[in-house]
Structures are given as C-alpha cells and as structure tokens.
Image (tube, rainbow, N blue to C red):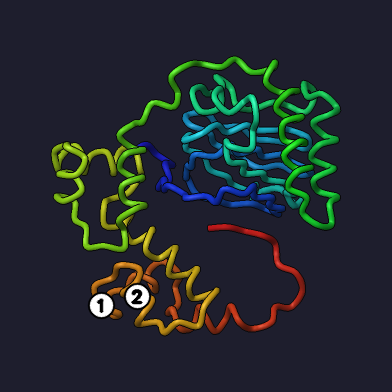
Amino acid sequence: MTPGMQEAFYERRDEEMTVQYSRNIDYPAHFHECLELFYVRSGGSRVTVGEQSALMETGDLALIFSNVIHSYLSRPQSEEASDSLLLIVPLSLTGEYRQTLAETAPENPFLPAGRLHPDVSYAFSSIAREEERNPRAERALVQLILSRTFPLLHLRKGAAEPTLVYQIVSQLAASYREPVTLDSLALKLGISRYTLSRTFSEKLGCGFPEYLNRLRLSEAESLLLSTDRPITEISYHCGFETPRTFNRAFLKRRGISPRDFRRLASEPADGTADCQIN
C-alpha cells in the first residue's frame, strides 16, 4: 500500500444536487458518479484528487469529475478554521457539459483563485446566500461555473472507462448487505482471488474484510441516527452475521458501542459543532 493511502469507498448519490457547508472538513477517499465542486470560502484544506494533491486556499476551486477518487483533510497546524462550500451535482443537471464530464477528466483539477472569473465567486456566493433551496437557480449557477472554468481546463479522454476498482466497489455497494466473501466477489468479477486481494491492499488501502465492514458500519450509523429500529435488527439488515459481530466491529471503529453512539447523538449539543465527516 502506498504510504498515506486511505481506504476508498463508493458513494451512491441521489438524483438531486447536494449543497454542503463544511468547517474543517475531513473526508476519506471516496468516489461517485457525480460532479463535485469544492470551493474554499476561507482558510485552507488539503485536497487529493486521483494522484494529485494540493493545499487549497481562500477562493480556490477543485473540479472533481465522475468516478475519480478524492479526499479532504483540514489543516491541523492552522489556527484559522477552514470554511468551504461543497456541491455534489448529478450529471443529469449539468446540461451541455454532461457528456464531457462523463467521458473526460482534467489533467489538473485545481484552479487557483487568481485564475477564476468573478462569475465563479458570484455563483458560489449566490448559492450560499439562499435561505431556501432553489434547485432551478442552483442548476443555472452550476452551469455558469462550468462555462467559466471549462476553458481553463486541459481535459484528457477516456477517464470514465470502468476500472477494476470501480467494478469492485460498485459490486460491493450493491451487495454488502448480503453474505459475500472474497471468493464469491472474485467469481462475480471474473478475476482471481489473488488479483482481488492485491487490488484491495494496493488500490483501496485496506483488506477485503475491513472494506466490507466499512460499508456495513456506515449504513448502520445512519440508521442509528435516523431511525428507532432495534440495534439487533439494524445489525442483521446491514449484513452482520450476529449482533455480537456488529458490536465488536462498531466498537473498534468508533470506540463506543452502537447503543452509546445512538444515545450520545440524541443528547442536545452545547453550541454549534464544526461539520466534520468521517
């Protein structure tokens, strides 16, 4: 595994655009089929897109095309909080840019503030000022951003060809609730067990069991926070063989039990916490 490599996972996204305000964002390596626009409003963040990494500052923009692995890391050394706006846009909402976004990727996804047209800052500021979501206006503003940034990008063809990593995580995203083993996954993908195991360690930064648990635990956390379903029922629904296995895996990841996680999340917070995703 490459030093510093993080586990990469596949995210299923809705067909609606996501507008997310983040302070001190930390988000592990992941990818999805949407366009992602990351705009730094103040402070700075370390952003990795594919094989490239950059320390982004106020006013900088990163354009992350479909199915490109990326991650975020706030700067722990900085006393200034990082404030960013993140747009996750289904390709169906990108108008004339849809095909290009699906079939290419920029050689350099990072655009510094000094190169950006004032319309880009205006578009992000307009989205941030909206007190209520206006999907039609947001779609128009996204296309304005693309119209001003595309001329600055050097695009390469063939970036959207399904890679083995994409096939692996897509298959697991659809089947992680079911009984699945390294051998059964290798058989579905038509590759050897050795190739699959090596791809996990070298490309995804973890072993097969760890990756599978990550998917299952992510859904379990969501259900613990958003429903009152019994913990035992959640453990089976997310693919764990027994509640005991679920509790052990959850404790290893979060440092607390699922029951305590749900209880602490329901307690009123003192003040407004920074938005951190992990």
For badge 2, the amino acid type reads Ser
Q: CA distance from mark 1 to mark 2?
A: 7 Å
Residue 92 sits in quarter: top right
Which residue is under mark 2?
A: 235
The crowding category of the residue bearing disc 1, from other C-alpha atoms within 10 Å (few below 14, some 14 to 19, many at least 20), is few
Q: Are marks 1 and 2 in contact (CB under 8 Å)?
A: yes
Left or right: residue 109 versus residue 119 is left
Q: Position of residue 1 (x, y in %)?
A: 32, 39
116 w.r.t. 56: above or below: above
Q: Position of residue 229 (x, y in %)?
A: 45, 82
The label on residue 242 is: 1
For badge 1, the amino acid type reads Thr
Left or right: residue 264 versus residue 43 is left
Residue displayed at 58% across by 52% down: 26
Residue displayed at 42% across by 41% down: 5
Q: Position of residue 134 (x, y in %)?
A: 78, 50
